[in-house]
Image: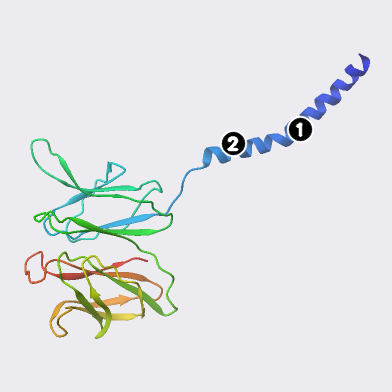
């Protein structure tokens, strides 16, 4: 009994030392568990290129983003959470119930720190609304160069060729084709687009496009060949990096 009593202070001291050593580990583990929040720099932009769909909204995991997208203005990039994988494009039908009609659904897995572009294409009048969903990433270009790719977002059977300062860079581009990124020396370019069947008739021209060192760009076409109103055929360019 005397030995038991004499050992009690030593036992308490030992327990205290163990607790002191273990406590920081417990606290550290607790902090890790409570602060594990998915972080991402995933970004998306929407380009509504349907001439007759009118403004549309995007629903991300069934939640509407407040700002609508109008033809043909790109939205610019906005941030997403890593779990935002279900996209729906809906047009608003004004009526007694103000219902919303779902036109496009995309269920995909996104990656952190990646930019994406969603092109809305086709025509409501012919029930051909569709989309082009692409990743806006590529290996860094050689020093002193940028990279450009081409997207044919003009619904129909047209096949296009594109030149940059008179040099062919994209050929035989069908509807929904997305070319590979092509390296180009940094500088100012005039892009011209032709029908595949003609090398002389310029369908559209985009002048004074600056390609910067180390940057990525997406050149695209939109509208209807031969139209002269707001649905007229033309080109645009997006800065992806």
Looking at the image, is mark 1 or mark 2 earlier in the sequence? 1
Q: Which mark is residue 228?
A: none
Q: Can residue 220 be seen from the camera position used here?
A: yes
In the displayed structure image, the side of residue 36 where residue 25 appears, left or right: right
In the displayed structure image, the side of residue 227 where residue 169 appears, left or right: right
Q: Which residue is mark 1?
A: 18
Residue at the far top in the pictured view? 1
Q: Is residue 134 above or below residue 16?
A: below
10 Å crowding of disc 1: few (<14), some (14-19), many (20+):
few
**Residue 176: x and y, percent?**
24, 65
Q: Quadrant of the N terminus?
A: top right
Q: Quadrant of residue 186?
A: bottom left
* Numbered disc 2: secondary structure: helix
Q: Which residue is mark 2?
A: 30
Q: Quadrant of the C terminus?
A: bottom left
Q: Can residue 47 be seen from the camera position used here?
A: no
Q: Is residue 163 above or below residue 10?
A: below
**Residue 148: x and y, percent?**
32, 73
Q: Nearer the viewer, residue 109 or 1?
A: 109
Instruction: Please tell me which residue is depicted at 41% across the width and 48% down the height of the picture.
Output: 82
* Numbered disc 1: secondary structure: helix
Q: Nearer the viewer, residue 114 or 78?
A: 114
In the displayed structure image, the side of residue 47 where residue 95 appears, left or right: left
């Amino acid at each position: 009994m005397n030995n038991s009593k004499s050992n009690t202070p030593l036992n308490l001291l030992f327990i205290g030392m163990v607790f002191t050593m273990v406590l920081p580990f417990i606290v550290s583990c607790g902090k890790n568990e409570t602060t594990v929040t998915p972080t991402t720099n995933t970004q998306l932009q929407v380009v509504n290129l349907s001439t007759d769909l009118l403004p549309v909204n995007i629903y991300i995991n069934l939640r509407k983003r407040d700002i609508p997208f109008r033809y043909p203005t790109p939205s610019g990039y906005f941030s997403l959470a890593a779990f935002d994988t279900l996209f729906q494009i809906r047009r608003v039908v004004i009526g007694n119930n103000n219902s919303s009609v779902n036109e496009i659904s995309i269920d995909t897995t996104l990656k952190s720190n990646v930019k994406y572009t969603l092109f809305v294409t086709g025509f409501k009048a012919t029930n051909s609304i569709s989309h082009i969903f692409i990743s806006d990433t590529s290996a860094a270009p050689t020093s002193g160069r940028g990279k450009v790719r081409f997207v044919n977002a003009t619904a129909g059977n047209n096949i296009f060729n594109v030149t940059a300062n008179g040099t062919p860079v994209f050929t035989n581009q069908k509807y929904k084709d997305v070319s590979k990124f092509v390296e180009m020396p940094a500088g100012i370019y005039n892009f011209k687009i032709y029908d595949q069947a003609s090398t002389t008739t310029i369908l559209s021209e985009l002048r004074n496009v600056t390609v910067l060192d180390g940057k990525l760009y997406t050149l695209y076409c939109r509208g209807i060949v031969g139209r002269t109103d707001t649905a007229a055929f033309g080109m645009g360019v997006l800065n992806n990096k």
